[in-house]
Image (cartoon, grey):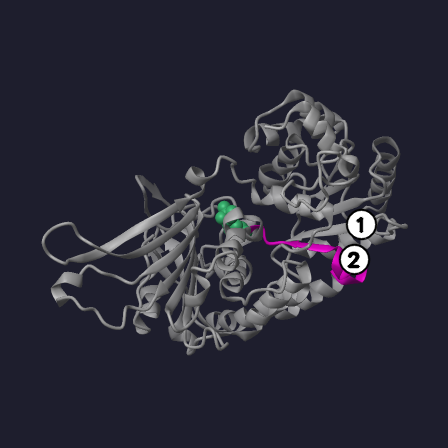
Amino acid sequence: MTSARERDLLLDGSSNPLRDPRDKRLPRIAGPSGMVIFGVTGDLSRKKLMPAIYDLANRGLLPPGFGLVGFARRDWGAEDFSQIVYEAVRDHARTPFRQEVWDRLAEGFRFVMGSFDDDDAFDRLAETVADLDRVRGTNGNHAFYLAIPPDKFPVVLKQLSRSGLTAQDGDQWRRVVIEKPFGHDLRSARELNEVVNAVFPEESVFRIDHYLGKETVQNLLALRFANQLFEPIWNSNYVDHVQITMAEDIGLGGRAAYYDGIGAARDVIQNHLLQLLALTAMEEPVSFRPDELRAEKIKVLSATRLFEPLTETTARGQYAAGWQGSEWVPGLLDEKGFNPESSTETYAAITAEVDTRRWAGVPFFLRTGKRLGRRVTEIAVMFKRAPHLPFEATMTEELGQNALVVRVQPDEGVTIRFGSKVPGHQMEVRDVTMDFAYGAAFTESSPEAYERLILDVLLGEPSLFPVNNEVERSWEILDPVLEAWAAEGKPDPYPAGSWGPESANQMIERLGRTWRRP
Ligand code: BG6
């Protein structure tokens, strides 16, 4: 724990005598700044953004005069907005509630009522922001967080520009934060990027892929590039295939407005899973400077192709009613708000290949689904079998493939699976695992992805945010799948609580592999 004196010194930034500017271990503290949130009444704001802002304040990482402005149509006064943030923090913050932190933070709250096509409301927003600069010392540094549906981006961006909110004088900065979906195919993503870049230069655009804010995802880079142990075998000589799984047990009740017509591939594969693939397969960057890191990710995505024919190398499904644990849950088509004829997939799997010397011939199987057996996200690197086993065949019947599994969540850590002798007189060999668990190895708990990402926005640290060409390349990979599916009938049904449709098993079995049951 940081003492009060240490915290004050930390808050003091550059003049902090405890701090050697070359020492990067201490988290950097955001300079004078504020954030405007559009979509302040939505789930994302309530469950993730507001709690993360409080958690950052609680950890002493926000400037003392931080300003938070909510913009929405609701007829709220300042008190109502403060109450909404309070409830969000109470219900979802990661760190304990501390009155003095809250009081200081709440002094910087402002609320502006208005709709996106209301010029006066944006003029009031501009005045509010200018007032924060005067009263709270936010110094003209503001981030605009668009936690709103993408079809509203153009009007909001236009308004920000019209009302002068995007103008930056001298050292001041203005940044925009956008949430996926970044378009729904390559064409619309390009259009969206044009709209955004017409108002904000690319270096001021922060596209959130919250998986990149997760500790375990960043640890993939440490695991690969800080150790001598893994990298020599991280290639097609040793790796048989890679499975990237993001399974969720939740259904889509309440999310029809966002999800119907979008589906699992657009919602998760286009962004989170292709980013995980990029980090798993990329070459070592020259340094972790944002441009160097992105250059390596782009190279991998550019070399990523889909196995064909797509009818055999992809699979999609839609959950039907079933037992989720001990609860009988409805199928997608019976969830409120979904078109009963909907062909939106809730399960998607693809087979990709990274066409480089390192990875040629190694299939990367990516899958995601709702209402699956349990919630788990993992990257499993599955190794080839030993070329020769000097044991009687019956002694190795229970020996599988060696595997290195990065457990992204829950139960964050890394598992290595290998064969070991079973105690006894025989030389019987069976699979065992060696585990590293974050919870056991470190006393610090991991910050929420949104804490890290919001702080990075305020610091202007862009490494963890995909740039427009990464987004466009990801659509380029996925578009043929979406087109092929659109031409087919409905997705294959699978019972809630299962591990997806039979077609997904057939997909992987055709290439002689089977899915892991995490
Ligand atoms: C979001 C998707 O990006 O990630 C959701 O839109 C999904 O559909 C969510 O539920 C999962 O995030 P996490 O951090 O809980 O794995």
Q: Residue at x 85, y 40 (%)?
A: 139
Q: Residue furthest left?
A: 425
The residue beneath circle 2 is 200
Q: Residue at x 49, y 35 (%)?
A: 443
Q: Earlier in the sequence, mark 2 or mark 1?
A: 1
Report the residue at 60% width, 67% height from top: 296
The residue under the point 31% across, 73% down is 510
Range of residues picked out in magenta: 196-210
Instruction: Point out residue 283 in the picture as x, y percentages from the top left corner.
Output: 54, 67
Label 2: few (<14), some or many (≥20) within 10 Å?
A: some
Left or right: where does residue 432 sit relative to residue 9? left
SS category of the residue bearing label 1: strand
User: Up-down: is 39 above or below 393?
Assistant: above
Q: Circles 2 and 1: CB distance less than 8 Å?
A: yes
Q: CA distance from mark 2 to mark 1?
A: 8 Å
Which of the 4 image quadrants contains residue 75?
Answer: top right
The percent position of residue 354, horizontal first and vertical second, equals 49, 73
Q: Secondary structure at mark 2?
A: loop
- Residue labelled with disc 1: 174
Magenta span includes 206: yes
